[in-house]
Amino acid sequence: MTVPFGKYFYLCLALAASCRLQAAGYEHLVTRCEFSPQECLQLEACSLRQSIHPIHISVTEITYSEKDKALQITSRLFIDDLELSIRSQRKEAELDILEPKNGLTTQQLVINYLTEHFKIKLDGKWCKLMFLAVEREDISLVAYIEIEGIKKIKTLEVFNDAIMATHEDQSNLVHVTFKSPVKSARLTSSSPSEKFVFEKK
C-alpha cells in the first residue's frame, strides 16, 4: 500500500511522542508541528527513557546518488525490538545484541538478520547489498547499506519484514528518493513489500 504523503505518518508518531513528552515535563521540546524521521525517533527516545516504547516501527531511507551511481540506504530499528527478533532467529533467549559473547559482534548479528529480512529488487533482479556499518543512535540501531553500479532505475521493489514475526503490528516505513519527490510506503505483515515505478525524464 503506497502512502502518498508519508510525512503524515511521521506527524502521527510525533504527536504521540509529544503527549508523552508533555506528561513527562518536556513541554519545551514540543514547539513545532513538523518532524523529520530522525527527529521522531529522537522524540521517542527522550520521552521513553523510563519506559518501553509502545510503537513498533522502523524507518528506511533509500537515496540514489547520481555522483556515485549507487543507492545509499539507512535503516533505523529500535534496539529492543531487534534484540527480541534476533534472539528468536538464533534461538538464544539470553542474547544481548549490544554486548554479545562467543566472539560475535553487534554488527555481525544485525547484518545476518537483515540479510534475511531486508531485500531490494531493481528492474526485476535481486541486488547484492553491501553493509557498510551498524551504529547505535540512542534507543535505535542504524544500518548503513549501499548498492553500487546503478545507472538507471525503472522499478525498485523493497521487501522488509524485519520485526514482523515478533510484533504483528510492526510497520516498516520506506522512503525512496530518485530524481523526483520522495515516494513512501508503509510495509506491514500482510503486505511486506512495495514496488516503486519511476517514469523516464
Image (spheres, rainbow, N blue to C red):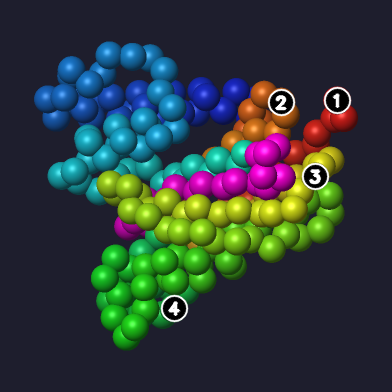
Density class for disc 2 (Cα within 10 Å; few <14, some 14-19, many ≥20) is few
Q: First in sequence: mark 2 or mark 4?
A: 4
Question: Mark 1–mark 2 contact, CB under 8 Å?
Answer: yes
**Which amino acid is tagged 3?**
Lys
Q: Nearer the observer, disc 4 or disc 1? A: 1
Q: First in sequence: mark 4 or mark 1?
A: 4
**Which amino acid is tagged 2?**
Ser
Residue 12 visible (yes or no):
no
Position of the C terminus by quadrant? top right
Question: Mark 3–mark 2 contact, CB under 8 Å?
Answer: no
Q: First in sequence: mark 4 or mark 3?
A: 4
The one of 172 and 153 positioned closer to us in this rendering: 153
Q: Is residue 69 above or below residue 116?
A: above
Question: Mark 1–mark 3 contact, CB under 8 Å?
Answer: no
- Look at the image and give the residue range highlighted in magenta: 65-81
Density class for disc 4 (Cα within 10 Å; few <14, some 14-19, many ≥20) is few
Question: Mark 2–mark 4 contact, CB under 8 Å?
Answer: no
Distance, label 1 to label 3, CA atoms, is: 14 Å
**Which amino acid is tagged 1?**
Lys
* The label number, if any, that marks residue 151 in the structure image: 3
Question: Which residue is under mark 2?
Answer: 180
Question: Which residue is under mark 1?
Answer: 201
Q: First in sequence: mark 1 or mark 3?
A: 3
Question: Which residue is under mark 4?
Answer: 90
Give the x, y percent position of residue 175.
59, 36
Who's the residue at 30% across and 75% down the image?
100
Q: Nearer the observer, disc 1 or disc 3? A: 3
